[in-house]
Image: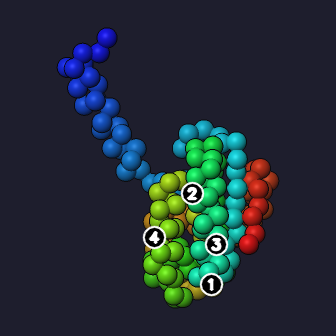
Amino acid sequence: MLTPPRIRRFLTRILPLAVLLAAAPAAQAEPLFGNPTHKVVYQFNQADPEYMEHVLFSVGALLRKYGDDIHIVVTAIGPGIHILAVDPRRPIPEIVRKRVASLAAYGVSFHACGNTMKALGWSEDDMLDFAEVVPIGADDLMLLQEQGYSYISW
């Protein structure tokens, strides 16, 4: 049986690990806890604020429904890439920026199309920390589907 001193010792040993896990980057190519049953990739290719809100709401709804049993990737290409830019050239509503950061913190992966970045003259330094740059956004969508991800286009 764990007595109060043993509980305190246990907590002092486990707390640093919990802090490290909480501080680790959330966006990963693979989910943190094994292979989920559900895998989805969203094509995000528009800079219209209403479009952005609808897609991100859908991403959040799936995350709320399936929790740790889903891995979601949002592949931003063309005008949609501005949601992942540190200093976007198109206006991105603050609520959208906050929602993207929140979803990334909950484990949603955000992929940025390298071709689109090249066309804009951007480098990885121009992207948010959690954004993963992929060489070609369309290729990313194809490869993820080949790995069993369901493709969602809006």
Q: Residue 53 at x, y = what percent?
A: 59, 74
N-term-proximal mark, 2 vs 1: 1
**2 vs 1, front mark:** 1
Q: Position of residue 28 (x, y in %)?
A: 55, 53
Image quadrant in which you'd find residue 72: bottom right
Viewer-side label of 3, 2: 3
Q: Distance between the residues labelled 3 and 2?
A: 16 Å
What's the amino acid at mark 4? Lys
Q: For numbered disc 2, what is the local secondary structure? A: loop
Amino acid under disc 1: Asp
Q: Which amino acid does label 3 sit on?
A: His
Report whether residue 22 is seen: yes
Residue 150 location in percent, x, y?
A: 76, 56
Query: Residue placed at 61% from the left, 76% from the top?
Result: 52
Give the crowd class for mark 3: few <14, some 14-19, many >=20 residues within 10 Å.
few
Q: Which residue in the structure is indicated by mark 1?
A: 48
**Pointer 4 or 2: first along the chain:** 4
- Mark 3 or 2, nearer chain start: 3
Eye-nearest disc, 1 or 3? 3
Q: Earlier in the sequence, mark 1 or mark 3?
A: 1
- Residue ID at (35%, 44%): 20
Label 3's element? helix
Q: Can residue 80 be seen in this view?
A: no
Q: Which mark is residue 98?
A: 4
First of labels 4, 3 by sequence position: 3
The residue under label 3 is: 54
Q: Which of marks 1 and 4 is nearer the N terminus?
A: 1
